[in-house]
Image (cartoon, helix red, strand yellow):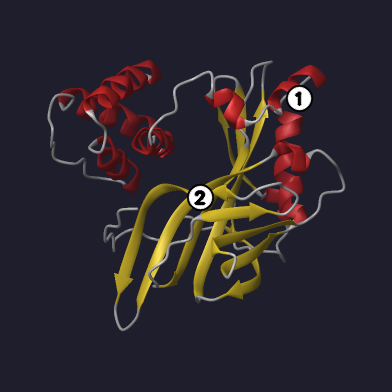
Amino acid sequence: MKKIVLASIPLFLIGCTTLDSSSDFTDAVKRIESKQNYQVVVGESLTPDVLEVKQGQLVNSSLELNYVTPTNDRAVPDSYITMELQYFKNYNEYRFARVKGADDKVQLKPYAASAETCSDICTQTQYVKFPVSNELFDEAPFKDLVFDIQVSNANSISFSVPAGYVEAIVNTGDKNTAVSPVVAAVAAVPVAAVSAEEPKASQAQEMVNYWYGEATKEEQSAVTDWAFKNRKNADPAPLEGSKEIEMVSYWFNKLDSEEKSQTMIWLLEQE
């Protein structure tokens, strides 16, 4: 993975409200995002419990659970966790996640470029996400969600997400959408089956979509105007302003010409 130095990027998953295992989870939901055929219930930032560290030295970590719940009978992607990992720099980035109760480990996907900061000691921060099957949320009482983030089996960190945090987010999603048993069955279709029907987006396209969704309506309009003006410009000047629109322009500039055309159509559809 290409690394760039972004010393100005804050630990942006650690916001004004950061929960931990001792918190009251009454207000554990940060927001609910409505998509075309599903909703995403986004949890407040949480500092997970660290169960075990094999090699390496963890400095900081935080995450958000994103619970996906369908609103019609179309298949939807898995729920997922977005996570920030800061650790004393080594030469191996974390690459996989293994969720307890799931069959296989999954590859971590970046939702922002890795950042490196150095003073007396260098630290590295990864911004990653990975899927969590909704089957793990089907049965009450809820249990702590335990998972490993791995470089390899010998180099990993084990985390635990409190059951109360999971329950608050899942219950909010289930109450917010009325889903029949048939819809629930369709929602359990693996992501691989969904992706077989639609062309897979590149990493850059996924990042543009993600950061566009994080921006305000005014910022989204500014992004669309900027992208339209620079659709034929191979190396446009990046947008300046909030972290969200700066990251949109960074990833937009990583698109090839065909992806830019596809993304322009997508942006105009959002207006």
- Residue 96: image quadrant is bottom right
Q: Is residue 66 above or below residue 152?
A: above
Quadrant where the C terminus sits is top left
Residue at the bottom extreme, as displayed: 120
Question: Could you say which disc has been placed on residue 184 in the image?
Answer: 1
Q: Residue at x 21, y 40 (%)?
A: 239
Q: Residue at x 32, y 24 (%)?
A: 263
Q: Residue at x 76, y 23 (%)?
A: 185
What is the three-letter code of the residue carrying label 2? Answer: Leu
Q: Is residue 132 above or below residue 149?
A: above
Question: Which residue has dot 2 on it?
Answer: 108
- Give coordinates of residue 178: x percent, y percent: 76, 22
Check disc 2 and report its element: helix, strand or loop: loop
Answer few, some or many: residues within 10 Å of disc 2's Cα (few below 14, many 20 plus, some between 14 and 19).
Answer: many
- Give coordinates of residue 4: x percent, y percent: 27, 57
Residue 126 visible here: yes
Q: Residue at x 31, y 84 (%)?
A: 120
